[in-house]
Amino acid sequence: MSNTIQKKKTKEPSVKNNPEDQEFDLALRPLGFNEYVGQENIKKNLAILVGAAKKRGDSLDHILVHGPAGLGKTTLALIVAKEYGSGIRITSGAALEKAGDIGSILTGLSDGDFLFIDEVHRLNKTVEETLYPAMENHSLDIIIGKGTSAKTLQIKLPRFTLIAATTKISLLSNPFRSRFGASYKLDFYNQEEMEKIIRRSSDLLGIKTSPEAIYIIARASRYTPRIANRLLRRARDYAQFNESGFLDAEVAKKSLDLLGVDEIGLENTDRRILEVVAKNFKGGPAGLKSIAAAVAEEESTIEDVYEPYLMRIGFLARTPRGRIVTDAGYKHIGLEQPKESQASLL
């Protein structure tokens, strides 16, 4: 079986991706389930799935992994392929524009290989429908000709496993979702898990880090490993620039201040959203379009990048009439909640 792993560039709205970032992320990727921190239940299920398939000498059921960006969906796919002992091809939904694109990839796989499609919700309908017979019968239907003279040619495919990842599972069609034999939702990590991840990253990169600095960076990481590693890299740069080389609590705090990130991970845009709803709309409810216009951001960016974390930590709430700032959100930005706003929440 082929063990070639092809990697692609990924992009997260709030994190710029460059060659240094990719090299950094690759160096820190866990190589097995024992190195992967968190998501314990999912790891156990995947380990059973892989182990049982190996004993049968069969390919795995197709796997769907969903959840917010930066939680380790790609890493899990790579680990599954490595644990099974097969190669993996990596692509994205946006890169597969026509049926021929997915056909050329599938015909190049070997028995037992894996195909990982990131952001699978961005597949167009034609490519998605081409995948149906490939996932069910391991065959590819190609139509030759047009009209009454059209003929269907069926190509036999190797027994591959599709691992699909998405941040928006609601955008997947029911026929597509039903073809996955296993579906897992990745959730945000907790403080202890984030500290373990940062400690591991520090050791791999040879960064001397104090426990206090690890705690500070973990608390500001928004419970997301990708963001934690980015903050660690920036703190390392700050320490090296000042020729200390040691990442202590003071260095961690100063590097976060320079990035505009506060102690719980809120960025300038997060605070701006809270302030706009609190001041301009008297705490809300405020519509998404109005908030987007006020903070000069796209609606999708607010809804997908900033709003989930603000809601998770209880600073912002969503009601049928719009978004409102909670009492905790008011306290964080140093404002007092209006009495009329408090009454409207009761």
Image: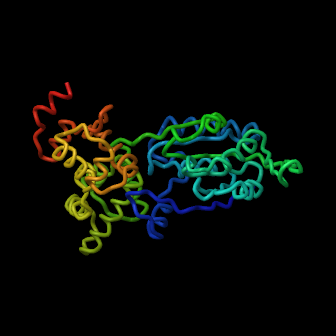
Judge by depth and name the residue closer to the eye, 77 or 108: 108
Which quadrant of the view contains residue 255? bottom left
Where is residue 176 drawn, in percent x and y? 64, 39
Residue 211 appears in the rendering: no
Which residue in the rendered view is the most extreme toward the front? Answer: 147
248 vs 75: above or below:
below
| Residue at point 69%, 52% (across, down) | 86
Q: For residue 312, which quarter of the picture? A: top left
Looking at the image, residue 153 sits to the left or right of residue 177; the answer is right
Screen quadrant of the N terminus: bottom right
Q: Quadrant of the C terminus?
A: top left
Question: Residue 145 location, x and y as percent?
Answer: 85, 55
Nearer to the camera, 58 or 286: 286
Q: Which residue sits furthest right?
A: 149
Where does the image place residue 87, in percent across and percent down from the top left?
A: 68, 55
Residue nearer the viewer, 162 or 56: 162
- 336 vs 308, left or right, is left
> In which image quadrant can residue 3 be found?
bottom right
In this rendering, the count of numbered labels is 0
Q: Is residue 323 above or below residue 200?
A: above
Q: Is residue 3 above or below residue 170?
A: below
Residue drawn at x 80%, y 45% is 139
Q: Residue at x 20, y 28 (%)?
A: 345
Q: Is residue 2 left or right of residue 310?
A: right
Residue at image x 66%, y 55%? 88
- Tell me if residue 11 comes above or below residue 72 in the rendering: below
Q: Is residue 225 visible?
A: yes
Give the color scheme: rainbow, by chain, secondary structure or one colour.
Answer: rainbow
